[in-house]
Image (cartoon, rainbow, N blue to C red):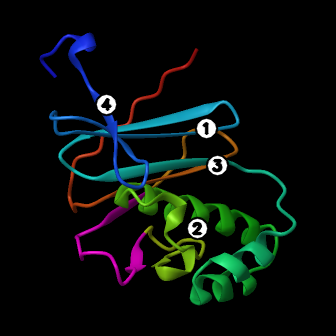
Amino acid sequence: MGRAPQALTFSIGPKGKPFCGGSGLEFNLSHSGGVVLIALSRDVPMGIDVERARSAPDHLQIARRYFHANEAAELVSLDEPEAEAAFFRCWTRKEAFIKALGDGLSMPLDSFRVSCLPGSPAMVLSLPASCVPAPWTLLDLSPAEGHFGALAMARQGAAVSLRSLAF
């Protein structure tokens, strides 16, 4: 960034998303089960999410209550354990998207739709009414064994470089 670390200033957007003032640097982070994901970009809004796979016996109830009706119907149509894996895939895609927008969970999860069926490419299928259309890119990540991850970016065709650090 060409500045000393102590010269950097951080602020929080209107809905709580942090940003580095005056730099054009976009960043986002997520953690779960000892795995941390950090996303960095220049002037491209993005969000990242990671979830540790775990038993979630109420995943279909959660989907019916909070997800887009089509997403919930797709999840209900699947057999276990495929439905549980699809739930986590859908959840990380949705969370990465709302984090990219800077809205966090203030945006209802049923106001937009992402793909969630096994084998389907990660895509934003419908946008919330409040969202300015953008050429969204949604990527699935496999950050570690037993974890689901997703990256959402308000640009198509952006180069993505993944790095792994172990401590």
Asked whether residue 125 is drawn in magenta, I would say yes
Give the foreground label among 4 and 2: 4
The percent coordinates of residue 67 (x first, y second) are 62, 78
Tell me the kind of residue under disc 2.
Answer: Cys
Tell me the kind of residue under disc 1.
Answer: Ala
Residue contact at pointers 1 and 4, CB within 8 angstroms: no
Q: How much space separates mark 2 and mark 3, taking CA atoms? A: 11 Å
Mark identifier at residue 10: 4
Q: How much space separates mark 1 and mark 4, taking CA atoms? A: 30 Å
The percent coordinates of residue 166 (x first, y second) are 55, 19
Mark earlier in primary sequence (3, 1): 3
Tell me the kind of residue under disc 4.
Answer: Phe
Mark earlier in primary sequence (1, 4): 4
Mark identifier at residue 144: 1
Q: Residue at x 67, y 30 (%)?
A: 34
Residue interval drawn in magenta: 123-139
**Res. 152 visible in picture:** no
116 vs 21, left or right, is right
Q: Quadrant of residue 8?
A: top left
The quadrant of the rendering that contains the N terminus is top left
**Most extreme residue toward the front, as rendered?**
14
Q: Which residue is mark 3?
A: 51
Q: Secondary structure at mark 2?
A: helix
Q: How much space separates mark 4 and mark 2, taking CA atoms? A: 31 Å
Q: Which residue is mark 2?
A: 90
